[in-house]
Image: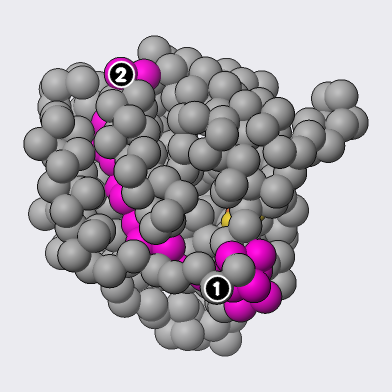
Amino acid sequence: LTEAACHSLNTDITRHPCYSEEAHRYFARMHVPVAPACNIQCHYCNRKFDCVNESRPGVVSELLTPDDAIRKVTGVAAQLMQLSVVGIAGPGDPLANADKTFETFGGLRNVVSDVTFCLSTNGLTLNKHIDEIVELGIAHVTITINAVNPDIGSQIYGWVYDEDEDRKYEGREAAELLISRQLEGLKALTERGVLVKVNSVLIPGVNDEHMSEVSRTVRSHGAFMHNIMPLIIAPGSRYEEEGREAPSPRMLHKIQKDCAGEGSKIMRHCRQCRADAIGLLGEDRSADFTWENLA
Ligand code: CLF
Ligand code: SF4
């Protein structure tokens, strides 16, 4: 998309702290944690904590109901002039809690103007929600895609639950289903004018050598930007039991550089936020915005 096209779709990246490196110095995002459930199992995750796809492991966000989230955003927007984005990123998968997620965005539409809506998902059920996302004006969606090859994906995901069939998939089949839904959702959103960022968790020994293929594939399906994030292992997760380790900064930078060299627009300023973060990236002011302070 050209910059002019972004403006006409209300996908003004110059005010989005994640989609624009420059914007992250001046504009703030607020996450509302309304989405507790998840429909897949990543080996780096422990459900006691927030979704690791866009968040630090070991963090527990306090859940909000959609009504409370709407009240909270209204209060914060009145006090935090830099607020430009409201996002739903957990603590589970926002689209595994589609009713709560869309009720929140729908309600916010009526009470805040001049903020962009942002959604982060593992992508499993995106195919069912494209129209709703577009109709609610959710201009930015992030999909966490860690592999595009099911053999590699089967080393990352324990299972995937398909609610329509009421069936739990495991192993290669689970990864195959998830990957096909992710790529289908990415393409469909892009075709409808939504700006899609792809997050990938870099897992040494699993997807490090695969990452440039991931980057190429998501680019060819329309991804606007690729955010390759270092694995941080949640306490109590399968990867912790296996003794896996985070990538070195050197490995992360080399892979980001290689993917950029092949033509992907790489995000380098991600701070792996919590599902209830408020403020500039890297800053968490959620403690400043208690109900008492907002009253
Ligand atoms: Fe939040 Fe994510 Fe939207 Fe940003 S975070 S839902 S795109 S408004 Fe940003 Fe945080 Fe990194 Fe995510 S720094 S974890 S990339
Ligand atoms: Fe955990 Fe993965 Fe579900 Fe996020 S998508 S809550 S990391 S299992």
Q: Tell me the crowding category of disc 1: few under 14, some 14 to 19, or many 20 or more residues within 10 angstroms, Cα based.
A: few
Q: Residue 253: name its quadrant.
A: bottom left
- Which residue is rendered at x = 70% and y = 48% of the image? 158
Q: Is mark 1 within 8 Å of ligand 2?
A: no
Residue 181 place in picture, x, y as percent: 59, 24
Residue 143 image point, x, y percent: 47, 39
Q: Position of residue 162 (x, y in %)?
A: 78, 31
- Tell me the SS state at disc 2: helix
Mark sitting on residue 220: 2
Residue type beneath disc 1: Gly
Q: Is residue 118 above or below residue 233?
A: above
Q: Amino acid at mark 2?
A: Ser
Res 185 label: none
Front one among 56 and 276: 56
Residue 170 versus residue 251 in the image, above or below: above
Residue 106: x and y in percent read 60, 39
Determine whether, in the image, residue 138 is placed left or right of residue 47. Answer: left
Residue at image point 47% right, 16% down = 188
* Residue 256 located left or right of residue 134: left
In the rendered image, residue 286 lying in the magenta stretch gets the answer no
Which residue: 14% across, 21% down?
A: 2
Q: Secondary structure at mark 1?
A: loop
Q: Residue at x 48, y 64 (%)?
A: 55
Q: Which residue is mark 1?
A: 243
Left of 100 or right of it: where is 88?
A: left
Instruction: Mark yes or no: residue 63 visible.
Output: no
Q: CA distance from mark 1 to mark 2?
A: 34 Å
Viewer-side label of 1, 2:
1
Q: Would you say the beta carbon of the disc 2 residue lies within 8 angstroms of ligand 1? A: no
Quadrant of the image containing the C terminus: bottom right
The residue range painted magenta reads 220-241
